[in-house]
Image: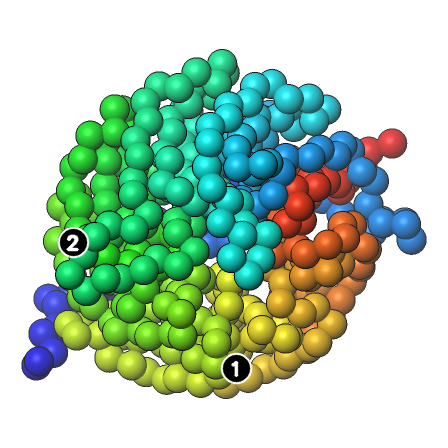
Amino acid sequence: MKAKHWAFAATTLLSLLPCVAQSDGGSDWPSWRGSQRNGISRETAWTWQWKSEGPQVRWRASVGAGFSSFAVAAGRVYTLGNTDGTDTVYCFDAETGKILWQHSYPCDPQPLSYEGGPAATPAVDGTHVFTFSKGGDLFCFDTKTGEVVWSKKFEPWPQLPDDWVNTWRYSGSPLVQEERLVMSVGQGGLALSKKDGTVIWESAAGHPGYSSPVPFQIPRGEAIAFFSGHAVVGALADTGHQLWRVPWNTEWDLNAADPIIHGGKMFVSSGNGVGCALFDITVDPPVELWRNKHIKNMMSSSILWQGNVFGFNNTHLACISWETGDLNWRTRDVRKGCLVLAAGKLVLLGETGKLVIAEATEQDYKPLAQAQILDGRCWTTPVLAGGCIYARNAEGQVVSLDVRTGKE
């Protein structure tokens, strides 16, 4: 297909300006990867200069098996876990760890080659919080009372002619965008009314992949990228109309890391030996600019910061150039981990529960502090909000670490 250039200059076509409705609430973290959906926290009043025993534990909790991260908003913390075939949505007081409300429902944890349990992170939008289970249970709760406002059920394995199988079921976290609730369901996403769950638009049935919707802007308005089981699809947010499609095949269709979109370009990465690539998405079809295996995101999404991409390559952490893909550095100090970024610092949680704070710089890997905060398998992205780091392991042991500056 001949490339069709859009009317505006490439430098002004797309930008990393997600149209997300959630209020940031200062240092709140209201949804998966934060209010800007990029893994970067606005937190500034925090410290990594803790004592040798590590940061102070504010509170601990047990929520059941799973890999759901945390939404933090208005003094409350939300996450999910599964115990004996029952999912539970928890709402904690951020200061004390007291359970303010919880809601349970039956759900098969599907421990296929790992512990199983829910993987999607809640999304808070004002007075409502939205949660999604591995089995396709979608809920809208009142944040104050935990009352169910509305709910829907999506089947994990629709009967289709090509007999596709979403092996690990649903993992994509909800995205609130204006009046829409956007979900990684179908080949190219689904949009519902956040008010009552009615369908606004939906894509053809098929493998949705395991990543979450990524919002971005184009001259025509708001758009969303969906990393499905076989491709990355760009769609208009209001209608679901497909803008472009980038084929991307990974063994077991394990496409789990969110794409990164910035300045008319899109970074895509997956594990199982595939690697990463950068595409120009100001043309249709998008054009590949470079490809290599310096970063292979098996689960954790990478972060773009000051012209560099920080991410995991199965066994090590790496930093590469956004423009060229060249490797700046890599380290095995943190392996198969997850990360967020705040105040120019990487907040890293390794698979074995080691927390590391490091400089987010292209020069070299520069760790500043570390502490063993959990045991067991840790595949869940930590969250830094309100002066606390929230982390969990696969069994559902949750820890809230006090890293506020100026505390007694």
Above or below for 385 versus 342 = above
The residue closer to the viewer here, 168 or 312, is 168
The residue closer to the viewer here, 136 or 72, is 136
**What crowding class fits label 1: few (fewer than 14 Cα within 10 Å), some (14-19), or many (20 or more)?**
many
Distance Cα–Cα, label 1 vs label 2: 33 Å
Residue 134 horizontal side relative to residue 245, left or right: right
The residue closer to the viewer here, 16 or 131, is 131
Q: In the rendered structure, which disc, 1 or 2, sits on the residue that comes first in sequence?
A: 2
Label 1 is placed on what type of residue? Answer: His
Residue 83 horizontal side relative to residue 179, left or right: right
Label 2 is placed on what type of residue? Answer: Ala
Above or below for 271 versus 24 = below
- On-image quarter of the C terminus: top right
Image location (x, y in percent) of residue 399: 72, 40
Say if residue 218 shows up in the picture: no
> Image point 37% across, 35% down: which residue?
137
Q: Secondary structure at mark 1?
A: loop
Residue labelled with disc 1: 294
Quarter assignment of residue 262: bottom left
> Image point 57% across, 26% down: which residue?
91
Q: Secondary structure at mark 2?
A: loop
Image location (x, y in percent) of residue 346: 64, 60
Image location (x, y in percent) of residue 185: 28, 49
**What crowding class fits label 2: few (fewer than 14 Cα within 10 Å), some (14-19), or many (20 or more)?**
few
Image location (x, y in percent) of residue 7: 10, 66
Say if residue 407 shows up in the picture: yes
Residue labelled with disc 2: 204
Residue 213 horizontal side relative to residue 329, left or right: left
